[in-house]
Image (cartoon, rainbow, N blue to C red):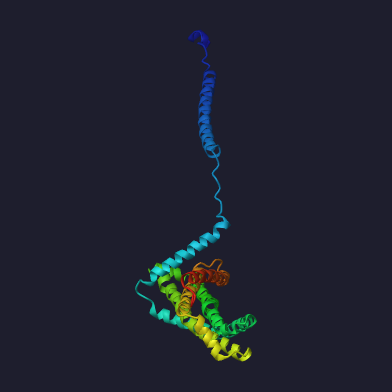
Amino acid sequence: MTAEATGGAPGPAHPAGTTGGPTGGTTGGTAGEALGGATGGVTGGATGGVTGGPPAAPLRPPSRLLAPLRESGKLFALAVTVTRAVFRRPFQFREFVEQFWFVASVTILPAALVSIPFGAVIALQVGSLTQQLGAQSFTGGASVLAVIQQASPLIVALLIAGAGGSAICADLGSRKIREELDAMEVMGVSPIQRLVVPRVLATMSVAVLLNGMVSVVGTLGGYFFNVVMQGGTPGAYLAGFSALAQLPDLWISEIKALVFGFLAGIVAAHRGLDPRGGPKGVGDAVNQSVVITFLLLFFVNMVLTAIYLQIVPAKGA
């Protein structure tokens, strides 16, 4: 007896595979599409947000045309800081004495040797010119005024900037690359007050005192060459000097020397505190400090001379 006979007619077969296949496929496809859409939306949104927006403007390097203005501002700021630090305590008196002696020792002999030919050249040139004009009696006054007002402060400033200023710049620059200045700042010690202020005051003091010596030596050299080489008379030389010279001529000479010494010290300290490129940068900073000081000296000398001639009238005017 068969199963159909005993169990009755077989029921309809359930197409489980057929039903599960389309349902699972449809469901899986729908989920996949949803997941893919979400992933695509997120990815597309993120990518579009990053790459679709406007590009950021690139940072431009600072213009080289403004570099002199920036350096001038730093130099002026250092000058103001040093001027304010002069009146703060404690004052480094021992450092000041050591720097004063060092700057004086490297500039006294060269200044004396340079002032003699300077005074001689001025006396010879002025003497030759006054002979052509028939005013030989004014040789002494003209040559002495040229030495005191112009030559003496410039000689002192150039020697201080070339000998003392270069040494100051090299010293500070070597301390900077060895990170000694950074260590001082960490310990709460100001490098400006501890190192820069005594050096600037030393250059100013040496410039003022050395200016008097150069004026005397230059005047004596001019006197000797005018009297001996050109046959002038001592009386006429001294009479011409007393007829044209006056006390403010000496004051403006000392003021120039003071200002020039300040400039030499500030420029040397400014370049020494900011060397670039390691040990080679220190050498470059020394060269730059000397050149910058020379340019500033001649410009400031022109300004001070113009102001003096406008304020102080000539003797006998």
Quarter-wise, where is residue 82 in the image?
bottom left
Q: Position of residue 177 (x, y in %)?
A: 51, 70
Q: Is 185 on the left or on the right of 37, as rendered?
A: left
The x and y percentages for residue 164 are 51, 78
Residue 245 seen in the current view:
yes
Nearer to me, 284 or 126: 126
Residue 74 percent location from the top left of the image: 48, 63
Question: In terms of depth relative to the viewer, which is nearer, 136 or 5?
Answer: 136
Relative depth, front residue between 315 and 196: 315
Image vertical order of residue 16 relative to residue 255, above or below: above
Q: On screen, 297 above or below 15?
A: below
Q: How many labels sit on residues?
A: 0
Which of the 4 image quadrants contains residue 48? top right
Q: Quadrant of residue 142?
A: bottom right
- Counting from the top left corner in percent of width and height, residue 59 is at 54, 50
Vertical order, 218 against 10 (above or below) = below
Identify which residue is drawn at 39% across, 70% down. Answer: 85
Q: Is residue 184 visible?
A: no
**Which residue is situated farthest in the left direction here?**
89
